Amino acid sequence: MFHVDVNKLNGKIAERNTTKEAVADAIGVNRSTFYRRLKSSTLTIRDIHKICDVLRLSGADALEIFLAA
């Protein structure tokens, strides 16, 4: 399991002028499922890769968001 820094992820989503709903749609996940996975830190590797692509996250940003301590 990965600990997701939701605050940093929300910041990156805002920087890209998009919403969590739009990200969920872009990665092909139901919106409620996406929120549930964020809340419980149960994103799959596939979800993480897709989010990184959609938000154009750098490797450093991805590490800070998805492998937060």
Image: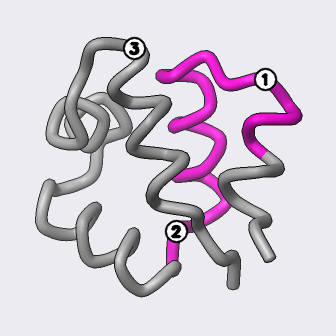
In the rendered image, residue 62, in percent from the top left (x then y), is placed at: 74, 42
> Looking at the image, which residue is at 48% across and 22% down?
54
Measure how far apart labels 2 and 1 are at the Cα level: 18 Å
Give the quarter of the figure containing the C terminus.
bottom right
Q: Please state which amino acid type lies under the numbered disc 3.
A: Arg
Which residues make up the magenta segment? 42-62
Tag 1: Cα neighbours inside 10 Å, few (<14), some, or many (≥20)? few
Quick check: is 59 in the magenta stretch?
yes
Please state if 16 lies on the left or on the right of 4 as rendered. left
**Can you tell which mark lies on residue 16?**
3
Location of residue 35 in the rendering, given as x and y in whole percent from the top left corner: 24, 66
Q: Quadrant of residue 33?
A: bottom left
Disc 2, SS: loop
Image: 5 above or below 63: below
* Magenta region includes residue 45: yes
Identity of the amino acid at label 2? Answer: Leu
Q: Where residue 21 is drawn, which disc sits there?
A: none
Q: Which residue is mark 1?
A: 58
- Residue at figure coordinates x 61%, y 50% from the top left: 48
**Which residue is label 2 attached to?**
43
* Chain-order first, disc 1 or disc 3: 3
